Image (cartoon, rainbow, N blue to C red):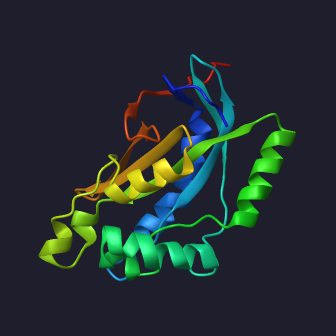
């Protein structure tokens, strides 16, 4: 994992496209009862000038199967961030075996784990109660996100915000440091043939 600050994040377009290919079906299936997450690990290389995200990898959600996850949600997350996290469909805990597999596969390719990307939906549109609708999500981190970013220490924490307006779904991405500061995001340009 890089040890220097991340001044800019450069993301290959196919990384965002692959994430959207996974996130859009999840987004389309969201209900107030099933606030399903979408999460992936970002891999690439980092220099003092930039962090270049070259690919992503998905792993299983161990939110209900990992004893450490069950304990963390029960003793820290629910008391600190609210009863909404009692719903086991809310929140993501990457399966530790998958994280190890992703790390080893990345090392074989000369890539390191740089961080993660996860989806924020337009919850204010989906939620059923006025209190839930007042919790507007965006591509900015929630207090829960800030807790996770700090705990992982990964230098790149990307939030992909999906929103439906007038029947059209749009997205934007923003990156955040482990301390919650915004990190500039750039997308590489595909070379013309």
Above or below, comparing residue 50 to residue 55 in the picture: above
The x, y position of residue 77, in whole percent, is 41, 70
Name, please, the residue furthest toward the right.
108
Q: Residue at x 40, y 81 (%)?
A: 87
Q: Left or right: 66 with respect to 70?
A: right
Q: Nearer the viewer, residue 11 or 7?
A: 7
Above or below, comparing residue 31 to residue 12 in the picture: below
Q: Residue at x 35, y 78 (%)?
A: 31
Q: Left or right: 51 with respect to 176?
A: right
Q: Quadrant of residue 78?
A: bottom left
Q: Residue at x 29, y 60 (%)?
A: 122
Name, please, the residue furthest toward the left.
130
Name, please, the residue furthest toward the front.
75
The x, y position of residue 45, in whole percent, is 69, 29
* Whether residue 89 can be seen here: no
Q: Residue at x 45, y 79 (%)?
A: 74
* Whether residue 118 can be seen here: yes
| Quarter that holds the C terminus | top right
Q: Quadrant of residue 95?
A: bottom right
| Quarter that holds the N terminus | top right
Q: Left or right: 97 with respect to 133?
A: right
> How many numbered discs, if any?
0
The x, y position of residue 47, in whole percent, is 64, 21
Q: Nearer the viewer, residue 5 or 76?
A: 76
């Amino acid at each position: 994992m890089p040890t220097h600050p991340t001044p800019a994040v450069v993301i290959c377009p196919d990384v965002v496209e692959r994430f959207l290919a996974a996130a859009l079906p999840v987004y389309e299936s969201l209900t107030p009862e099933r606030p399903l997450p979408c999460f992936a690990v970002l891999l690439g290389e980092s220099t003092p000038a930039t962090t270049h995200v070259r690919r992503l990898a998905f792993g299983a959600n161990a939110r209900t199967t990992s004893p450490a996850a069950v304990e963390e949600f029960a003793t820290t997350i629910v008391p600190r961030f609210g009863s909404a996290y009692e719903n086991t469909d809310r929140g993501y805990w990457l399966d530790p075996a998958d994280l190890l597999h992703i790390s080893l596969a990345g090392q074989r390719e000369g890539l390191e784990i740089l961080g993660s990307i996860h989806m924020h939906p337009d919850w204010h549109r989906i939620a059923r109660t006025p209190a839930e609708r007042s919790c507007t999500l965006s591509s900015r981190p929630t207090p829960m996100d800030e807790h996770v970013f700090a705990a992982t220490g990964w230098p790149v924490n990307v939030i992909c915000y999906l929103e439906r307006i007038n029947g059209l779904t749009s997205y934007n991405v923003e990156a955040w440091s482990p301390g919650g500061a915004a990190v500039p995001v750039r997308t590489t340009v595909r070379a013309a043939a």
